[in-house]
Image (tube, rainbow, N blue to C red):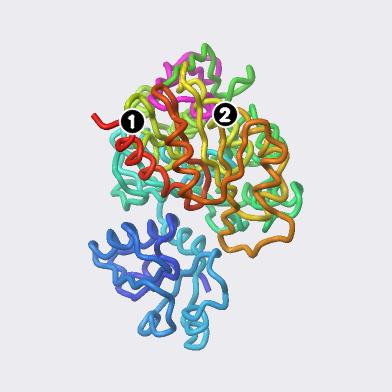
């Protein structure tokens, strides 16, 4: 049975794993619709505190009786189907919705744009949201990271647009049926779900078929994967972007600076203005080009879109400056795939200017580590010195013979250091004024960034 938001208003919806970036955003939007929300998560966090503050009943720990009285249950695919709350909901015949199905319900009443791709989804979704806001619109949005300008990852707007990050990791992005979509790139990742690159391409091919025929697809002409899935699309308006001379939205005259990036933007061969970003990196210019192309496809004015992009200040854990002590800058970044790591570290080298780039990296998932060991080693060696932590397993069990040590064995500048405290002490002792330190990965390595800042303050007291 399919549901609409009217089926949920006034009802009690329970979220299993409500502390996750995507789940907490959905909970926030549902509360704004008048839905009674409860939820549970394994650990307490600021996210849970924020949900409690707006009326959600949130508990720490998963227990069967947490679902008592619920009319619907929403679960993340990261949650085991053996979870006691899911078991209880099944026993009580409580309708269950995946996170993607719940998001699809919220998107269904708007002109929605789903932002998909192996890399860059969070930043591109955030850029498009800010750009549309600059046009005087109030879009709804659901992002897998915190938008720096608002401090939020989700919002129920008063306008007609809904901008959503479309996570392909479990194939569930085919649930969204958006009006329009962006595909930033297509590459093999999430190897726990997609066993081969071919399976990834099939998923994106299917995703494209779910886009409204009255809508559009924006794709990156510079990326072979995105261009490949878009080349045979028919019956749907398509717009390409990139540096390729035949791109509908072309960027050229590119200037990459340590703390920002700039490019001329041409739409259908005619200059429409300049993209000026206060976030660095060529990859971010491409993300901005995607957002600009989508905004134009929605009929919004180029000048206002460009003005919005110029105000973009980034999202949480995407090259996020956590502190500066005695000329040493500490950055936290979510990059966890070799392609993302290469882009981040190339940008960081430019950002460091004459200083050194020091990295603490934590591989994410045993399956991804096993699949990309040589590529991780090559990407990480861009930095000047790297400490590699042991693999963060997430929901996976260890795979025999798979360790972060295997990455370090192929590196020139890497040190295997599984102890968080030892790695932190090492990078703090090694750092000198002018250096840039990055905590890198999708796991709990991010917890080290504030500790490093505090330790640097102790080492270099004013």
Mark 2 secondary-structure assignment: loop
* As drawn, 448 above or below 95: above
Foreground pick, 155 / 211: 155
For residue 119, the mark is none
Dot 2 or dot 1: first in sequence order is 1
Disc 2 designates what residue? Answer: 383
Foreground pick, 197 / 94: 197
Residue farthest to the top, as pictured: 253
Q: Please check the rendered image and state whether residue 175 is part of the magenta-colored stretch, yes or no.
A: no
Residue at 38%, 59% (x, y): give it: 24
Horizontal arrangement in the rendering, residue 5 relative to residue 378 (left or right): left
Foreground pick, 96 / 296: 96
Would you identify the image quadrant in which residue 318 lies? top left
Picture coordinates of residue 175 (x, y %)?
56, 59
Horizontal arrangement in the rendering, residue 245 relative to residue 34 (left or right): right
Quarter of the C terminus within the rendering: top left
Q: Magenta residues, as a range?
A: 260-286
Q: Please check the rendered image and state whether residue 275 is part of the magenta-colored stretch, yes or no.
A: yes
Q: Is residue 124 visible?
A: no
Picture coordinates of residue 8 (x, y %)?
37, 71
For residue 324, the mark is 1
Horizontal arrangement in the rendering, residue 46 relative to residue 197 (left or right): left
């Amino acid at each position: 049975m399919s549901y609409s938001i009217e089926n949920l208003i006034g009802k009690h919806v329970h979220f299993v794993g409500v502390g996750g970036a995507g789940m907490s955003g959905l909970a926030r939007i549902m509360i704004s619709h008048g839905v009674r929300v409860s939820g549970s998560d394994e650990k307490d966090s600021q996210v849970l505190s924020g949900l409690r503050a707006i009326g959600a009943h949130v508990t720490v720990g998963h227990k069967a009786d947490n679902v008592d009285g619920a009319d619907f249950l929403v679960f993340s695919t990261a949650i085991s189907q053996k979870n006691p709350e899911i078991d209880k909901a099944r026993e009580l015949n409580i309708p269950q919705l995946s996170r993607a199905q719940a998001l699809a319900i919220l998107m269904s009443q708007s002109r929605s744009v789903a932002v998909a791709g192996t890399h860059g989804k969070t930043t591109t979704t955030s850029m498009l949201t800010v750009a549309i806001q600059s046009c005087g619109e109030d879009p709804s949005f659901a992002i897998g990271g915190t938008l720096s300008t608002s401090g939020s990852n989700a919002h129920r707007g008063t306008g007609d647009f809904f901008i959503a990050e479309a996570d392909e990791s479990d194939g569930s992005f085919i649930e969204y049926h958006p009006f329009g979509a962006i595909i930033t790139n297509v590459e093999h990742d999430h190897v726990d779900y997609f066993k081969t690159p071919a399976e990834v391409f099939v998923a994106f091919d299917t995703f494209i078929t779910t886009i409204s025929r009255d809508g559009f697809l924006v794709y990156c002409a510079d990326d072979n994967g995105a261009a490949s899935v878009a080349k045979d699309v028919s019956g749907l308006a398509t717009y390409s972007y990139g540096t390729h001379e035949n791109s509908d939205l072309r960027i050229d005259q590119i200037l990459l600076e340590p703390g920002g990036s700039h490019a001329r933007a041409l739409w259908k061969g005619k200059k429409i203005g300049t993209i000026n970003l206060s976030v660095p990196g060529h990859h971010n210019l491409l993300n901005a080009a995607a957002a600009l192309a989508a905004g134009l496809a929605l009929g919004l004015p180029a000048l206002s879109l460009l003005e919005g992009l110029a105000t973009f200040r980034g999202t949480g854990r995407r090259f996020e400056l956590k502190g500066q002590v005695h000329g040493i800058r500490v950055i936290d970044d979510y990059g966890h795939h070799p392609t993302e790591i290469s882009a981040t570290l190339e940008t960081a080298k430019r950002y460091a200017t004459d200083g050194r780039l020091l990295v603490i990296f934590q591989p994410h998932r045993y399956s991804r580590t096993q699949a990309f060991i040589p590529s991780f080693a090559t990407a990480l060696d861009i930095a000047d010195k790297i400490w590699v932590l042991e693999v963060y397993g997430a929901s996976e069990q260890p795979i025999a013979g798979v360790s972060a040590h295997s990455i370090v064995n192929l590196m020139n500048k890497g040190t295997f250091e599984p102890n968080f405290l030892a790695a932190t002490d090492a990078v703090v002792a090694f750092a000198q004024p002018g250096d840039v330190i990055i905590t890198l990965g999708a796991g709990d390595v991010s917890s080290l960034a504030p500790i490093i800042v505090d330790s640097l303050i102790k080492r270099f007291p004013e």
